Image (cartoon, rainbow, N blue to C red):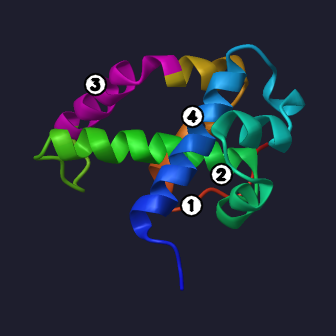
Amino acid sequence: MGRRTETTDYLKECIADALFQLMETQEIEKIRIDDITELAGVGRMNYFRYFNSKAEVLHYKMGQLFYRWADEHPGLNETPGFDNALAFFRFCLGVKPYIEQLHRHGQMGMMTEFMISPEGYDEMD
């Protein structure tokens, strides 16, 4: 029997929040999976059940933030245009602390990849 979606989402969110918290004081390359799981209060198996890399964790968190934001701001559409560009910049302002962490750790390319393919992210450069 598989985990319920709420439980899965909760565990993934705990892992992502822990990684971002650790990034406040450590370089991402030096953060160990054990550090993340200990802070998140989950087992290593949970980490590897849901993620293959720290890049996937970052991508997941930014996706969650974006989809929550988009739900609160209806009217976005898939047609490129000024309104969508403006909406994206507003989203970025709303999640500025996360974006600052990505920038500080040289992971801004992940944001571009996320916007191109919000469903998945393969590897961290």
Give the Cα distance between marks 2 and 3. 24 Å
Q: Which mark is residue 17?
A: 4
Q: Give yes or no for contact between labels 2 and 3 (Cβ–Cβ under 8 Å).
A: no
- Magenta stretch bounds: 82-97
**Residue 49 shows in this picture:** yes
Q: Residues within 10 Å of mark 1 (few under 14, many from 20)?
A: few
- Nearer the viewer's eye, disc 2 or disc 3? 2
The amino acid sitting under disc 3 is: Arg
Q: Give yes or no for contact between labels 4 and 2 (Cβ–Cβ under 8 Å).
A: no
Q: Quadrant of the C terminus?
A: top right
Taking the view exactly as shown, the residue that stands out farthest to the top is 25
Q: Residue at x 35, y 19 (%)?
A: 93
Where disc 2 sits, the SS reads helix
- Nearer the viewer's eye, disc 4 or disc 1? 4
Q: Residue at x 28, y 24 (%)?
A: 90
Please check the rendered image and state whether residue 93 is part of the magenta-colored stretch, yes or no: yes
Where disc 3 sits, the SS reads helix
On screen, 57 above or below 94?
below
The amino acid sitting under disc 2 is: Glu
Q: Quickly name the residue at label 3.
A: 90
Q: Quickly name the residue at label 2.
A: 56
Residue 14 pos. (x, y %):
56, 42
Q: Provide the major secondary structure of the magenta segment.
A: helix
> Disc 2 or 1, which lies upstream in sequence?
2
As drawn, is 86 to the left or to the right of 98?
A: left
Q: Give yes or no for contact between labels 2 and 1 (Cβ–Cβ under 8 Å).
A: yes
The image quadrant of residue 52 is bottom right
Q: Quickly name the residue at label 1.
A: 120
**Residue 108 shows in this picture:** no
